[in-house]
Image: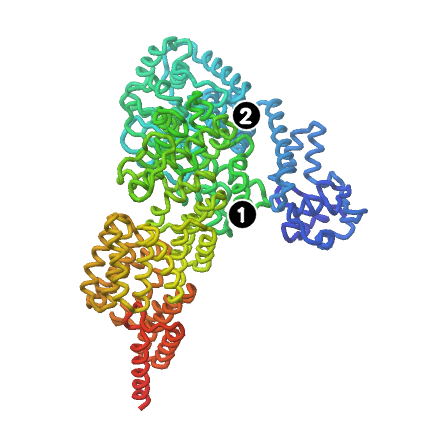
Amino acid sequence: MVIDVRLFGAVRVVVDGVPAELRGWRLRTVVAVLALSAGEQVSVEALAERVWGAELPERVPQSVHTLIARLRSAVGADVVRTAAGGYVLAVPAEQVDVLRFERLLRDGDDAGALRVWTGQPFVDARSEWLTSTVVPRLEELRLAAVERRADAVEPSSGLLAELRELAAQHPLRESLWIRLLRGLARSGRSAEALGLYDVVRARIADELGVGVGAELQALHAELLGSDAKLHGSGEIEPGTPRSLPVEVPGFVGREDELAALTGAGALAAIDGMAGVGKTALAVHVAHRLAARYPDGQVFIDLHGHTDGVAAVPAGEVLGRLLQAFGVPLERTPENVDDRAGLLRSVLAGRRVLIVLDNASGEDQVRPLLPGTAGCGVLVTSRHRLSGLDLDVTVSLDTLSQSDAVELFTRVVGRDRVATTAPGVLAEVVEQCGRLPLAIRISAARLRTHASWRPEDLLERLQEHRLSELASGPRSVAAAIGLSYRELDAPLRRAYRLLGLHPGGDFGTASAAALLDSPDAGRCLERLLEVHLLNEPSPGRYQFHDLVREHAIRVGSEDKDRRTALARLVAYYCQGASEAAAQIYPQVAEVSHGLAPIIDTAEAAQSWLKAELPTLLQLPTEAECTVHLSGSLYLYLRTLGRSTALEDLHRRALAVTNDSETRTDLLLRLGECLRLQGSYTAATAAFEEALAGAGDYSQGEVQARRGLGIVLALRDRNDAALTELEIALRLAWASADRDCQLDVLNAIGWIHTKRGDTTAALDYTQQALAIAQSVGHRMVGKLLAGIAHDHLQMGKPRVALEFYEEALEHARAHGNRHNELRSVDGLAEVHRQLGDLTRAMTYREQAMALATDLGSRNWQLEAHQGLGRLRLALGDAEAAVVAHERALELATALYQPVDQARAHDGRADAYAVLGRYHEARHGWQHALAILQAVGVETTDETETGVLALQAKLGYVIEEASNQAL
């Protein structure tokens, strides 16, 4: 029996000339693992690890045995033998192509070995061990053999084609390029070799941020010398260079930028951060424009941002340009200005495109501009070249998400991600910051790890993003690090400290606090110029995600780190205090020893709007967190940000032990929880506050008020009034106007719930008088409460006036909860007045606000009101749906009276639809609830004990008539 094992290309076992059937990638992987050790034992443990990797089966021996049995069935039982603790592939090493390849290399027969290599090994196997360990070793052996062969023989067209193909596959392997360039020169193609050198140097600089090695630089000098000898005398023969690099594969997007750069304009520049794809775009544009410039297209890397390589002086660049256009070296002037003048003469009347890649700045570029009609120049740089007189400037941003996903897909291969959920790919590119360099690196890592799924890559990026974004010599951190190292010392310090800023973006004032520098604005502008910062809106700056991560990394050991953060926290605490005091005069301002930051209510609103995300992410320190929880309470509550308030107060409670401070925090936390409809948790917070209040009378008043409101929300109105009456006596005794106001308002609301509108109006008007006397923020809420009482009394036109005044007050003060309360009331007023169109307009506003604020109680009211309105408009089916949603919310909130209202509304709709049995059941349920909780009337005149009894009598009569 003759066995031939082929591992180059697809894994195959040929038995006596007949290919064996190897079904499944795992079986083919077993063949590869055993064949690489042909004639030698492979232990069960090693075989399992190399086949399954980290995801070993539960029962390793049994799983391995199953695969071996399948292999024996395919190739013959004698071919795979059992040895102590493992298995042996009983095949001579010479019959395994990979082992034969290695033997020929050891014998020095490179040509023979390369004939054995028939394709990439193990293409239809799947193993992390093969991919990460075996394939790179074999690939290195092959490349080294090709290079030795290139050194030993005269360059043939076939060898040059092979070198070119391998260099394209391994663009960062300089030794391949050296053989290719040398081979071209030996074949009389030195000009082509010189053109390729610029391509190689640009590619390595763009992807690695470093210069080419000494050997390649020496070869370049040698090529230049040879070229000079070839053109040593005679008249200048105009050359037609075509040295544009090959386009980067997988180019996507950039439609707007392409349109701008390929339109009118001879002088254009592309700037952007490291890795954003400036060179790729420039090369793509240059290829598109090539037909417009038939007299030549030249690409030159200026090395403005290449690690370890100095920027190319303008004189040297001019010399290379002159040589590219046929000027012999000995006829090139020494003086830079003379060289520039000669270049203008050479290019006069010609249409030439010059791509100047990787410029350090304007001074390097300015002498290189031909200033000749008909010539085009395209410059790329990490710096904004605002000092040049440019026709078009494109500041390159990261890719859109769709383009980023498309780039990732093209690089990794569509088949590889065909079954991957779109959300996974979207998250992968977001982890890459939608930066092209990062996307290409992550895709390359996935492509080279055959056992990885995109989900595995995503998990690794989420854990160690910047570390994972490296593939071989390519690294996002290295590219960003070069931009950082090019800064002067003060800017490097600014970069490190700004990385500490917790906000998504920041302004000059907070940066000044962090840097402790009055020159912070200039620092920000300079970092913006070199694309280490972005400016998403005027005066607001931010890091790209990956740049921020790098800044945090290099700033982690900065000796000024702690004091800088302390300055930043003090700035934000004082700013929050001053802003709150400007908007809410009753809030006491607290100074943190800084100069005033905010001096008007308008400035306070603007400052809080811009800085709120940062305020909520400041480091958790006792004084800071407790201070912010108080300063921001009214503002966040006005905005309806109850979840953010809850988080802030829980963090503050975790870092303070002061009893009075804890009472205040618990009271505010209870309010947050109540607004969210979390009544059990709110009750617990108020009870803990009451227990810890001690002699703190204001704390006891507010705790009892909070408990009373939660009891009332659960329709325990008598118990609620008991708590509130105690609170009111304490408030009158303390002469605390705020406490009196809060408790009076709460008692008035409960009387409204009980149907005693006369008492409700009395308490609410007392509260309004206090509020107006001190200019309290509750004026709008109290106006809405009085409007509601008039509506309950059957006076919708009076209610309309109060609701409109309440809405005007709410919008003027930015109080979204009071705005919601007002528009909800106006919707009901207009329904009762018969203006259903206007009622629907307000109802839709109420629904949107309730949803946006996340208030389940107001969502309930919005759905309930919508159901009533839909029925009035003749759409009973839609009314049923709305009332069912209201019932779900009322049940979830454990609010019995609101459940009764929802049952009643749905029953009304059922009756209109002629579904009398369901209507009767709904009204009976609503009536039972009201009688159980001892309530005669509700907030809706349609829902009360007498009204429900009348409806039940009606439905019984209608059902009887229907039966007849």
The amino acid type, in three-letter code, at marker 1 is Glu
Q: Nearer the viewer, residue 341 or 680?
A: 680
Which amino acid type is marked by label 2?
Answer: Glu
Q: Quick check: 915 above or below 336?
A: below
Is the C-beta separation of discs 1 and 2 under 8 Å?
no
Q: Is residue 74 visible?
A: no
Q: Nearer the viewer, residue 847 or 238?
A: 847
Counting from the top left corner in percent of width and height, residue 478 is at 50, 29
Vertical relation: 393 (above or below) 824: above
Residue depicted at x 29% and y 30%: 392
> Mark 1 vs mark 2: which is more N-terminal?
2
**Residue at 64% from the left image edge and 34% from the top image edge:** 137
Q: Residue at x 50, y 18 (%)?
A: 220
Q: Report how many numbered discs are placed on residues in the image.
A: 2
- Circle 1 SS class: helix
Q: Position of residue 799 (x, y in %)?
A: 21, 62
User: Which residue is the site of mark 1?
Assistant: 455
